[in-house]
Image (cartoon, helix red, strand yellow):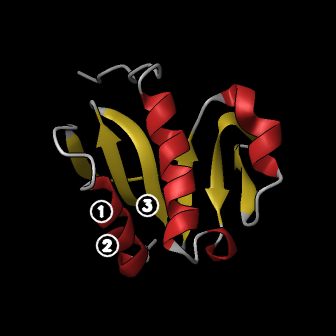
Amino acid sequence: MAYDTQLADRVRALLQEYPGWPIEEKKMFGGLGFLVHQKMCVNISGKNLMCRFDPALQKMLAEKPGYLPMVMRGKTLAGYCLVSPEGSKTKKQIQFWIQHCLDFNKQARSSKKKN
């Protein structure tokens, strides 16, 4: 699946406002992932943002414009969501989602490395 390169550029520009944070870009989930401290933080999937956030905030975040639950293999994943273009039109909207992703990144667990 192709991803929205303009959205990726907007996310990249916002993440560059955090100098000193180890940010890596990686093709993943059929899109482009932005890893912070070697942990998936935010991803561009098609025209959507895929966000990883504190699962305790799921109900509150679900009320935000553009929020879509993240469903894999028929199961809703707690702490992950997609944000449609409706919820990422403005810089302020994208900053909101990225900030929640970065806040959770500090406590998020890294995925196990495959040998």
Q: Residue at x 31, y 37 (%)?
A: 36
> With respect to residue 52, does 96 lie above or below?
below
Apparent side of residue 85 relative to residue 22 in the rendered image (left or right): right
Residue at the far left in the pictured view: 20
Where residue 78 appears, x then y in whole percent?
Answer: 71, 32
Residue 12's disc is: 1
Indicate the quadrant where residue 66 lies: bottom right
Mark 3, residues whose alpha carbon is within 10 Å: few (<14), some, or many (≥20)?
A: few
Residue type beneath disc 2: Asp
Q: Secondary structure at mark 3?
A: loop
Indicate the quadrant where residue 83 lies: bottom right
Q: Residue at x 34, y 60 (%)?
A: 14
Residue type beneath disc 1: Arg
Residue 30's disc is: 3
Mark 1, residues whose alpha carbon is within 10 Å: few (<14), some, or many (≥20)?
A: some
> With respect to residue 75, does 70 lie above or below?
below
Q: Are marks 3 and 1 in contact (CB under 8 Å)?
A: no
Q: Residue at x 29, y 24 (%)?
A: 114
Q: Nearer the viewer, mark 2 or mark 3?
A: 2
Q: Which residue is mark 2?
A: 9
